[in-house]
Amino acid sequence: MADRSFSDDDLRLYDLLQQFLSLSNSTEHGGTLILISPKGSIVGDCTLAPEDLVAATDALLKLNIQRANQAAGVDTSDELPEVDEQEVAAMISALQDLADGDA
């Protein structure tokens, strides 16, 4: 068997994939992610339940808000405001409808 060395990018993408896979054990299908390395090889894929999409979107939204505030010099020492999960779910649903051509 040939030795295969993994780049730091490959390992980080694999770690990201593992985090998505760890979101829940739900069998509902809300979407599928395919992670591809910078060299074009598929690192892996995962199917996410609708609630997993909401959780991941919520977490990334909070991170992006925090980074934008830090870049703008806004004091982020206070806790970030809660994101309305129903609003995020509605946005995801609307995007899915657009993707499906239902809009």
Image (cartoon, rainbow, N blue to C red):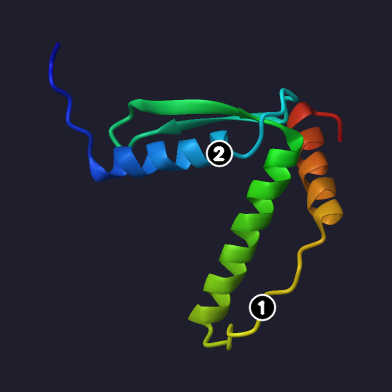
Residue 74 or 1: which is nearer the viewer? 1
Callout 1 environment at 10 Å: few (<14), some (14 to 19), or many (20+)? few
Say if 15 sits above or below 100 in the image. Answer: below
Residue 86, compared with residue 50, is above or below; it is below
Q: How many labels were placed on the picture? A: 2
Marker disc for residue 49: none
Query: Are there few (<14), some (14-19), or many (20+) residues within 10 Å of tag 2?
Result: some
**Residue 37 left/right relative to 55:** left
* Kind of residue at badge 1: Glu
On the rendered image, what quadrant is the N terminus found in?
top left
What percent of the width, then of the height, locates residue 71?
49, 79
Q: Residue furthest top?
A: 1
List x then y, in percent, for residue 63: 57, 64
Query: x, y (%) of residue 46?
Result: 55, 27
Q: Residue at x 85, y 47 (%)?
A: 90
Q: Is residue 11 left or right of residue 30?
A: left
In the picture, the quarter occupied by the C terminus is top right
The answer to which of 63 and 40 lies nearer the viewer is 63
Q: Which mark is residue 79?
A: 1
Q: Identify the residue under disc 2.
A: 20
**Residue at x 46% of width, y 42% of height:** 16
Q: Secondary structure at mark 2?
A: helix
Quadrant in which residue 100 is drawn: top right
Left or right side of 58 for 42 = left
Q: Residue visible at 81% across and 34% down?
A: 97
- Cβ atoms under marks 1 and 2 closer than 8 Å: no
**Could you give the CA–CA distance between mark 1 and mark 2, rounded to whole angstroms?**
24 Å
Q: Amino acid type of disc 2?
A: Phe
Q: Residue at x 62, y 39 (%)?
A: 23
Sequence-first disc among 1 and 2:
2
Secondary structure of the residue carrying tag 1 is loop
